[in-house]
């Protein structure tokens, strides 16, 4: 894989090969991000605690609300991208839609980061139940997939369906992360701070 | 679009993440004990020499509103067995039984709203706990059960009796549920190589006594709230 990427240097590659290389490097970086998070979560001994936000009853509540905030902004992401791509017939794309899409994405991502830090530092990558295993896997995969999406975003010449596909993947993974954590938390302990 | 902005977003997230990680690391040593608590730092369950501190140990900012002392008891999902958990500071004791042959005593640590406990024969319990309930799973005799147990108050909760009759160690545990119903298992030869449990005799929660044939078992409550049963395991 690396040999192919390296070979594309001196000789001008064919367009298809260039497309593969453009996708390959971000994909490898994204995979390494996901892998690094998982390995850290598995090797680092969970402490049980981490820094927290005052005013909530527990770290679980804080994380559930932050994750829910991330999901809300992620829904804005999907909606704004549908409008941007002209998929919603009745709503023509307003000039600020790109800004809305970018900022909702940034906020969703930045809301997810503290949750992930707490998960990895305080709890670690766990597998003691199906829910926990799925959550651990998807949580790591989310940051990998998001990294890939960010890295391919500015690259010209990629197939037009690729970015929406990665956006959908990131959203789907985040939804899975939320359902296996915040949804479980709220349905178990009740919706409260 | 500026091609740098997605990269800046990623870097901002990375910086935030690393910053929070460093802050967490700085907060940890002075805060609650780690899961891998060393006996010097924490009176781990099983260490008789270190008595439970009279004052509740100062908890970290992170865990200030998670109860430091609590008792939970409830049926597992689908019924058929019950689980009781007592949390006393960083220590936790749990008992799982079906009022017959399936039972397990577990010990472990509580921190930051999460419990990790182990027992004999690969018994394992993992749960999250809040003020109102503890929820998670328990694996005993190779079978996994899930539960969501409410917080309970005396006389509901966990009871244990250990008696030695003619060299045989009799060990019994009872879980008294919030509705007053109880489930208990008894090991007539707990010190045997492969102890087997049976249904425990009815426990009188008022006196703490149960009669097993000609033997009177005296049970003591295991309570995280009072500290009873902790530090003397």
Image: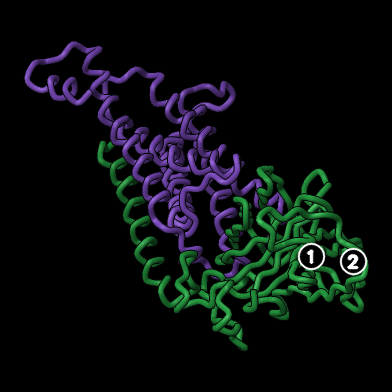
Pick the residue in front: A22 or B201: B201
Q: Colour of chain B?
A: green
Identify the chain drawn in purple: A
Pick the residue in front: B18 or A106: B18
Residue A43: x and y in percent read 38, 51
Chain letter of the residue beneath label 2 in the structure image: B
Q: Of the two numbered discs 2 and 1 on the same chain, state the one appearing first in sequence.
A: 1
The answer to whether residue A72 is visible is no
Q: Are marks 2 and 1 in contact (CB under 8 Å)?
A: yes
Residue B109: x and y in percent read 57, 66
Vertical placement of residue A57 versus B127, above or below: below
Q: Residue at x 81, y 58 (%)?
A: B185
Badge 2 crowding class, 10 Å Cα cut-off, few under 14, some 14 to 19, many 20 or more, is some
Kind of element beneath mark 2: strand
> Quadrant location of residue B154?
bottom right
Pick the residue in front: A13 or A158: A13
Q: Residue at x 47, y 75 (%)?
A: B39
> What's the mark number on residue A128?
none
Instruction: Give the CA separation, mark 2 to mark 1.
Output: 10 Å
Left of B51 or right of it: where is B15? left
- Return the residue at label 1: B172
Vertical placement of residue A49 versus A135, above or below: below
Q: Quadrant of the N terminus of chain B?
A: top left
Total marks placed: 2
Q: Residue at x 76, y 72 (%)?
A: B164
Q: Residue furthest bottom?
A: B54
- Return the residue at label 2: B212
Q: Do the dots labelled 2 and 1 sit on one chain? A: yes
Kind of element beneath mark 1: strand
């Amino acid at each position: 894989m690396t040999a192919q990427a390296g070979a594309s240097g001196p000789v001008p590659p064919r367009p298809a090969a260039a497309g593969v290389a453009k996708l390959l490097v971000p994909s490898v970086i994204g995979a390494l991000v996901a892998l690094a998070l998982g390995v850290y979560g598995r090797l680092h001994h969970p402490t049980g605690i981490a820094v927290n936000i005052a005013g909530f009853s527990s770290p679980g509540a804080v994380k559930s609300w932050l994750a829910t905030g991330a999901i809300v902004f992620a829904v804005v992401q999907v909606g704004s991208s549908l409008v941007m791509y002209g998929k919603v017939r009745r709503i023509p794309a307003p000039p600020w839609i790109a800004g809305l899409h970018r900022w909702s994405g940034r906020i969703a991502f930045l809301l997810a980061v503290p949750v992930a830090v707490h998960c990895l530092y305080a709890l670690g990558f766990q597998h003691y139940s199906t829910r926990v295993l799925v959550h651990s896997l998807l949580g790591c995969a989310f940051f990998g997939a998001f990294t890939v999406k960010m890295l391919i975003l500015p690259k010209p010449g990629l197939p037009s369906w690729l970015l929406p596909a990665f956006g959908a993947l990131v959203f789907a993974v985040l939804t899975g992360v939320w359902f296996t954590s915040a949804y479980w938390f709220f349905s178990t302990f009740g919706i409260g701070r | 679009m500026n091609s740098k902005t997605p990269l800046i977003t990623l870097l901002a997230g990375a910086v935030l993440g690393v910053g929070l990680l460093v802050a967490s690391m700085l907060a940890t040593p002075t805060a609650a004990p780690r899961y891998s608590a060393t006996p010097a730092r924490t009176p781990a369950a099983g260490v008789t020499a270190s008595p439970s501190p009279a004052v509740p140990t100062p908890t970290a900012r992170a865990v200030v509103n998670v109860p430091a002392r609590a008792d939970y008891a409830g049926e597992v999902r689908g019924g058929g067995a019950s689980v009781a958990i007592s949390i006393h500071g960083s220590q936790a004791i749990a008992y799982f039984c079906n009022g017959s042959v399936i039972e397990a005593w577990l010990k472990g640590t509580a921190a930051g709203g999460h419990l990790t406990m182990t027992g004999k024969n690969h018994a394992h319990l993992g749960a999250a706990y809040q003020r109102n309930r503890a929820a998670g799973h328990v694996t005993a005799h190779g079978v996994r059960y899930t539960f969501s147990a409410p917080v309970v108050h005396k006389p509901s909760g966990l009871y244990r009796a250990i008696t030695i009759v003619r060299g045989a160690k009799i060990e019994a545990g009872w879980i008294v549920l919030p509705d007053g119903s109880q489930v208990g298992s008894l090991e007539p030869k707990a010190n045997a190589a492969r102890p087997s449990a049976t249904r425990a005799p009815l426990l009188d929660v008022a006196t703490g006594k149960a009669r097993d044939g000609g033997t009177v078992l005296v049970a003591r409550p295991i309570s995280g709230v009072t500290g009873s049963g902790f530090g003397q395991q």
